[in-house]
Amino acid sequence: MQKKKKVLSELYNGNITPQSRPIENGSKYQELQIKMAELADTLEKKLSDEEKKLLDEIISTWGSISEANGEECFTLGFRLGAKMILEIFETDDELLDLK
């Protein structure tokens, strides 16, 4: 039997990277990503060079906002999960008492 590696060790060593998971074919995320690219291409064809630079900056800033939001949501979700686990140990639930 192969020994399982510890989650914290794997996370520390960079072997767990939830943000770099592959995009599933046919997923809602992929559909929206394709639509965004098509809309940006359509708009870019109508813009001057200066306006294209502004659009690129908007898209880049939006990506940064999305990345920051993802990190905050991940952190909050992790903390919520940890609080739920702690609450399990704090509650004296007689229904779980197996005497």
Image: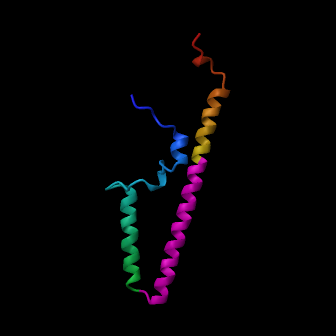
Residue 89 picture location, percent across and down:
64, 27
> Where does the N terminus fall, quadrant-wise?
top left
Residue found at x 39% / y 86%: 46
Q: Nearer the viewer, residue 80 or 43?
A: 80
Task: Indicate how the structure is coloured in the image.
Answer: rainbow
Residue 72 picture location, percent across and down:
59, 55
Name the dominant secondary structure of the magenta segment.
helix
Q: Which residues are magenta?
A: 47-76
Residue found at x 61% / y 35%: 84
Residue found at x 48% / y 37%: 5
User: Image height check: is 82 above or below 30?
Assistant: above
Q: Is residue 72 magenta?
A: yes
> Where does the C terminus fall, quadrant-wise?
top right
User: Image height check: is 77 above or below 62?
Assistant: above
Residue lying farthest to the top in this orientation: 99
Q: Nearer the viewer, residue 6 or 31?
A: 6
Q: Is residue 62 magenta?
A: yes
